[in-house]
Amino acid sequence: MVVTRAKETERKYRLPDTGGAALDGIAGMTLDPTPEQQLLDAVYYDTADLRLAARGITLRRRTGGADAGWHLKLPSAQNSDSREEIRMPPGDAAAGVPRELAEVVEGIARGEPLTPVAHIRTKRRQWRLLDVRDDVSAEVVADEVSAQTLGRSSTVQAWQEAEVELVGGDRTVFDAVETRLGKPLDSPPKLLHLLGDRITPRPLPKRAVSRYFRTQLDEMIRQDTRVRRQAPDSVHQMRVAGRRLRSVLQAFGGSRPLRDELKWLAGVLGEARDIDVLQGHLVDQLDALPDELVLGDVRRELTRTFARRRATARDHVIDALHSERYFTLLNSLEDVDSLPMSSKREAKALRKTHRRVERAFGRVDSLGTDRGLHEVRKAAKRSRYAAEATGHRKDARRMKKLQKLLGDHHDAVVARGELRTLGIQAHLSGGNGFTYGLLYGKESARAAAIEQSLHGRLAGARRSARK
């Protein structure tokens, strides 16, 4: 089945009795004066407890209009006016929700069936706003809505609403529209309007650490839907949200089993993320070399090597996100209403994360530089996220800077090992390992420079350890 993606940006307004004519004569735009009449009939799908709607997600099958078919709409993190939309042809209604759409929201439904929860009919009048080139900037619609909830009980509602949706124009179209229609209305999508108090939002916890925890969980679940549709940077962002959750649990006395499960998930996501980072870095380093120093088909070999690994890592991620183990983890995380800590105990826990960083510096010699600095990095990461959770921004910035520096060191160590392996393989297959050796030297120099920049910190840790 053909799947298309679009970005929907719209605002709702109170449209005067004159309809679209209220927008006639806006500077830089003209109104196509003849409204188009449409009859739209949509059935909305969700779990019985409305898990999609609770997260502002709508899934419907609609007939009528130019874009009849299945529509999955997901909130955009960047702007409340926008939603990401995935569309599919209508197909056979009896077949139920297409697999491609059901899989996108699987991390929210978690095995619960997606069944009809609402039936909404819309009588629509639609006008077009044209720019100076007669291209469509936006569409203006006035809707008469009749809606019915489905399921064990049924309610019927009717209302009117109007909205302006961008087509070819930018957000300055809204500015122009609002000179005539006033400020936009804070009105929910039609489904959420209908369901109303059937959706009970979970109030944010009062304490900062618990609010932070909830925010990161919501972000991880949002990124889950992006990972499933292979959105750019989604694996990394989901991994970061999971790390923050785990760090909060580590720093503030959270469940060890939950921490272990988050570690498992981070490992699966990290496999895919680290491959992308490593390949991107090596390609950048290779591109920076003069052509005469690139001996052999190094670029093709890098592409071939990492393509296989990326496909395998992607399969591992998807398998994990389909698993009962992952669903159980999400359910357990949602059951964490609060982390019972007083302000005094939170401050004490934060200081403990700082001391953990210093102790990690003191163990570098005994663990070896590469492994030791990696342990410092993990401790700095925990301290950074604990500082973020408690609102200590200065501490968070300081630890972020240290974490980034040590992350560059770790990347150099990993790249060095990869280049050694690639160089050996080139030699054994009769190729030339010169370029790999050259890049290996550059990574060694990068790691050494970072170690030198940390020399004072390491020396201080050694002195403290001897006392």
Image (spheres, rainbow, N blue to C red):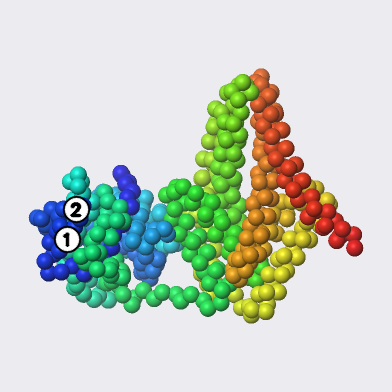
Q: Which quarter of the image is occupied by the C terminus?
A: bottom right
x and y percentages locating residue 353 in the rendered image: 71, 66
Are the two marked residues, 1 and 2, in contact with CB atoms closer than 8 angstroms? yes
Label 1 SS:
helix
Q: Mark 1 points at which residue?
A: 23
User: Which quarter of the figure has residue 103?
Assistant: bottom left
In this figure, what is the number of numbered marks? Answer: 2
Is residue 175 in sight in this rendering? yes
Disc 2 crowd, CA 10 A, few/some/many (<14, 14-19, 20+): many
Residue sitting farthest toward the left: 34
Question: Which residue sits at x=66%, y=75%?
Answer: 346
Q: What residue type is labelled 2?
A: Met
Name, please, the residue furthest toward the front: 27
Task: Say if 284 sits above or below 246 in the image.
Answer: above
Residue 241 image-quadrant placement: bottom right
Would you place residue 34 above or below residue 305 in this image?
below
Residue 375 position in % (x across, y down): 73, 54
The one nearer the camera, 103 or 33, is: 33
Q: Which residue lies furthest to the top in this view?
A: 430
On the rendered image, what quadrant is the N terminus found in?
top left
For the question of whether residue 257 can be seen, the reply is no
Query: Horizontal and vertical percent for residue 348?
Result: 71, 74
Judged from the image, the secondary structure of the residue bearing numbered disc 2 is loop
Q: Which of 363/225 is in front?
A: 363
Is 401 on the left or on the right of 330, as rendered?
Answer: right
Q: Position of residue 167 (x, y in %)?
A: 26, 51
Q: What residue type is labelled 1?
A: Leu
- Quadrant of res 250: bottom right
Q: How far apart are marks 1 and 2 (CA)?
A: 9 Å
Which disc, if any, is residue 29? 2
**Viewer-nearest residue: 249 or 299:** 299
